[in-house]
Image: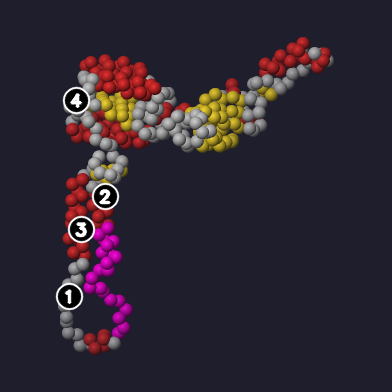
Amino acid sequence: MAGFLPLAFATPWLLGALLLLPAIWWLLRLTPPRPQEVDFPPTRLLLDIDKHEETHQRSPWWLTLLRLTLAALLILALAGPIWRPAKEVATGDGTMWMLMDNGWTSARDWTTQVETAERLLSLAEAAGQPVLLAATADGPGQPLTPTDATTALERLRALEPRAWAAKRSELTTALRKSAATVRPGAVVWLSDGTQSAEGTSFQTDLANIAAGSPVTVYSGTETPFALKAISNDADALTVSVLRHPDNDRNALTVRALDLRGLVLGQTDVIFDAGSHLTEARFEMPSELRNDIARVEVAGENAAGAVQLVDDSWRRRSVGLLSGQSGDLAQPLLSPLYYLQRALGPFSDI
């Protein structure tokens, strides 16, 4: 996009109407037509009436400026402004390959990715260019044959983020087979922002498959946080929180909910500088912790930011009875000692 503003227009030719603003300004400054004079006998009586309202011969300058501003804004609106439009993409002469990351890490900015893909597919539809649309999380089992851009748009609107990670390495083999049949004229990859070693390798593979055709990568989306490794010990329920190295946010809120969706507790988590792993703790009575069915990062719309808690994580109360008084004198010889050690991590003795 040329220029210094991240703004484009769907119908830029309508901006030529801005040249009519001087003519509109001249029309607004015209004096209304002079009223026709008609002799009326009681006119003398009317001269003695106080004048409460006067009509200006010309519009005030601020009113003229306001009208011109409204006219300019109307012209800009009709031109179809687009904020941060997709940059010009080298689409080549053949089939355009569009690859979208739809793993769980793409859920946070999925709407932004879809809007970008729709604009690119609209350009291909206007040019009559065939499109091969592939989702990286759907693996090699999806159809990898070129279609018209209209069909690709319909399939794009049916796509949604998956609950698992992208399978880029599995998709590479299937793309090589498809390229042997129909060579891509250009490749566009809408990345979810996880620029890991796998992502770099995938981009290299795309360049090799394209065999000289341009490869464009769209990135910049924010990767959501993730939860793992829940532990319900005697003092608190803890869960590990991870963030991507490219994520600059260092503070978030983790909530614990019951089966009805009611919040049983929440805790604020802060990452240390340079750290990508921290821990969220819910210190509450074990009876209340047993009602927790879901732990989630507040505000995150991603499968990896949610952990479900079932009965296997609940702590149960266990009572141990022994009729032998020697158990207190020599605990290592008592069967209760080993039962306590075995049940302690999972139950309240």
* Magenta extent: 49-69
Mark 2–mark 4 CB contact (< 8 Å): no
Residue bearing the label numbered 3: 21
Q: Determine whether 90 is above or below 20 in the image.
A: above
Relative to 166, 321 lies left or right: right
* Residue 100 visible in rendering: yes
Question: Helix or strand or loop: what does disc 1 sit on?
Answer: loop
Query: Residue at position x 36%, y 18% from top?
Result: 169
Q: Sequence-wise, which precedes: disc 2 or disc 3?
A: 3
**Horizontal side, residue 154 vs residue 311: left or right:** left
Q: Secondary structure at mark 2?
A: helix
Which mark is drawn over residue 94? 4
| Three-letter code, disc 3 | Leu
* Crowding near the residue tagged with mark 4, few <14, some 14–19, many ≥20 C-alpha atoms within 10 Å: some
Q: Position of residue 36 (x, y in %)?
A: 16, 78
Q: CA distance from mark 2 to mark 4?
A: 35 Å
Residue 232 position in % (x across, y down): 61, 25
Vertical placement of 232 versus 83: above or below? above
Task: Residue under label 1, please give it.
Answer: 34
Q: Given contact means CB atoms under 8 Å apart, are the residues at marks 1 and 2 in contact? A: no
Quadrant of the image occupied by residue 347? top right
Nearest to viewer (mark 3 / mark 1)? 3
Identify the element where label 4 is drawn. loop
Coloured how? secondary structure
Q: Amino acid at mark 2?
A: Ala
Q: CA distance from mark 4 to mark 1?
A: 68 Å
Residue at the spot 65% in from the left edge and 21% down from the top edge: 345
Q: Amino acid at mark 1?
A: Arg
Image quarter of the C terminus: top right
- Residue 122 visible (yes or no): no
User: Is 65 inside the magenta-drawn segment?
Assistant: yes
